[in-house]
Amino acid sequence: MEDHVREILKHLGEDPNRSGLERTPERVRESLEFLTSGYREDVEALLKGAVFEEEHDEMIIVKDISMYSLCEHHMLPFFGKCHVAYIPKGRIIGISKIPRVVEVFSRRLQIQERLTNQIAKTLMEHLEPRGVAVTIEAIHLCMEMRGVMKRDSMIVTSSMLGAFRSDSKTRMEFLNLIGSGGRHKG
């Protein structure tokens, strides 16, 4: 990868041997390995042993989970907040695992729509709850730095499964509790 980065630098008109760029290929490799570490993480292993029998049947929400990812179209960052809720049906998950699921899927080349669905479907599959809701509010640097160059554009996606899809009151309760509609800084 480092050789390819050197070639990219040359193609851009830079000298990869100048003092400020000498270690750039190594840094780019390390950065990309970290930012795409989700490919090397196993969600099944992450959730194994983290689901517990519990008769709680009210909505559980983890909101304002910081999320950072790379757009698969331009490999530029998009970042923001993820809000996750589920309604248990005899099983709950260790609460720290929800942000970890978000992290595993966001540390891959992504589009926000797929990321939202992957989080929701994974929790639905492993918990078998009454429902799962996921919303992501994100700023995409590919829109702000290039292309249409529109600052302050917030992309909002949602995935509503089970009771959150079929019951508008449940969906509205979730949206009200997360304070949907306001801009969250990433």
Image: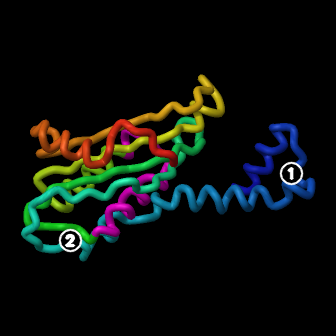
Q: Where is residue 24 in the image (x, y as percent from the top left)?
A: 78, 56
Residue located farthest toward the top when viewing the structure as drawn: 148
Residue depicted at 32% across the width and 44% down the height: 179
Residues rendered magenta in the picture:
95-115
Q: In this view, does 89 lie above or below 70?
A: below
Judge left or right: residue 6 versus residue 53: right
Residue under label 2, please give it.
51
Please name the amino acid that badge 2 sits on. Val
Residue depicted at 53% across the width and 56% down the height: 36
For numbered disc 2, what is the local secondary structure? strand
Q: Nearer the viewer, residue 170 or 12?
A: 170
Please name the amino acid that badge 1 sits on. Pro
The secondary structure that most of the magenta stretch takes on is helix
Residue under label 1, please give it.
16
For numbered disc 1, what is the local secondary structure? loop
Query: Residue 97 colored magenta?
Result: yes
Judge left or right: residue 45 versus residue 168: right
